[in-house]
Structures are given as C-alpha cells and as structure tokens.
Amino acid sequence: MTSAAYHHFGSRDALVSALSEIVLARLGHRLRDAVEAAQEQGPERLAACGRAYVTWAVEDPAVARLVFRGGATTAQSAISPHPHDVLTRELDRLTESGHLPPGARPGAEFVVWAAIHGLAVLLIDGLVHIDDRAGVECQTDRLVFATFHGLARETAPEPDRPTPTTTHTRRLTQSTA
C-alpha cells in the first residue's frame, strides 16, 4: 500500500501536500458557509468563522495536525476557497462597512488567525480543556470579539510594522505580479 501511494504521489511529502490541499479546501468551504449563515452583518460573521475553524480542529485533531504540522502546501497549491481568503474577505467587508478602521486592516488576518489557531492548537494538544462544543464556541466567540475590538481601536498602522506572509499569500502576490 505504501509503495502504491508513493508510486502515485512520488513521495510522502507529495502525498501529505495533496491531502492537505483537499482538507484546506474543505475547511475553506466550511468557513465560508459559516460566515454566510451568520445572522448579523458585523463582527458576528468573523466570530462564526472563528467558531468554524476551532470546532473543525477539535472535531478531528489528527487531520488538523496533519495540516498544521505537515508543511502542507506549496507555492503551487491551488486551494479554493482557501481559508485565508475567506478570512481576508470577511475583514475587507468589515472595513468596507465601517466596523473596522482602514488603518487597522493591513495584516489583520494574521492577528485574527493567530488568535483562533492558537486556541485550536491549545485545545487539540490538551493544554486547555473545555468540556463541550458549546463551551468551545463560547470561548472562541470571546477570543474573536476581544481580538476584533483590539483591532478596531487601531486608527493607523504602526509605521514599521512587519508584513507577515504565508506560502499562500506569496503565491497570490506572485500571480498578480
């Protein structure tokens, strides 16, 4: 079986990358569906995105770890919808609607992602314990709203703030250049 998979994919890394791309696309759909199903049009949609991400990780920690730790995707990975794009679009929408000041928008997706990803990893690694899904969702809401309200207080970007990137954002930059 192992040799058959390697014959098809060439290597363990290629297999992990292919699986990660499938999982990330499914996660992107899940995040997009959660945002679109949100009843409110403000930061509640962002909280829905956070809840979808954290509950996804908690529901299947082994798959989440594969994606988180596998060095999953490459610059050639074409994932649609990419979870990063769903988050980016939601933050753009919040800026356009006046919920998030334009000065706070640059790099905000990395701040929000760091918060929700951090909670997800803490939960699946057993460093934080919350007894049930409702509790996980409640804590995720608190985290997302606290992060959002902190961002919303920023009126202008700090002059020397570094610009974080990911493999995905680098690919997007290269494809538009």
Image (tube, helix red, strand yellow):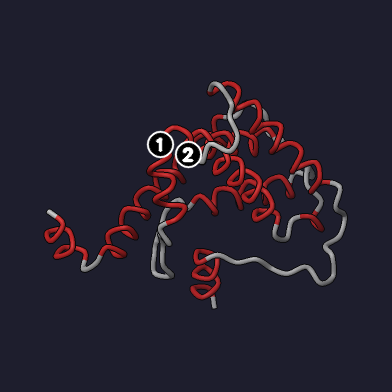
Amino acid type assigned to the residue bearing label 1 in the image: Asp
* Residue 14 drawn above or below residue 88: below
Disc 2 is placed on an element classified as helix
Q: Residue at x 63, y 46 (%)?
A: 90
Q: How many marks on residues?
A: 2
As drawn, the residue found furthest toward the front would be 127
Q: Residue at x 39, y 64 (%)?
A: 77
> Which class describes the residues within 10 Å of circle 1: few (<14), some (14-19), or many (20+)?
few
**Where is residue 175 drawn, in percent x and y?**
49, 73
Q: Residue 117 or 109: which is nearer the viewer? A: 117
- Quadrant for the C terminus, please: bottom right
Q: Quadrant of residue 59?
A: top left
**Where is residue 40 drawn, in percent x and y?**
67, 29
Mark 2–mark 1 CB contact (< 8 Å): yes
Instruction: Give residue 60's mark.
Output: 1
Q: Residue at x 65, y 25 (%)?
A: 138
Q: Residue at x 66, y 29 (%)?
A: 139
* Residue 113 drawn above or below residue 43: below
Amino acid type assigned to the residue bearing label 2 in the image: Ala
Disc 1 is placed on an element classified as loop
In the image, 6: left or right of 108? left
In the image, 9: left or right of 177? left
**Where is residue 127 drawn, in percent x and y?**
58, 38
Residue underneath mark 2: 57
Instruction: Give residue 78's mark.
Output: none
**Distance from label 2 to label 1 (Cα)?**
6 Å
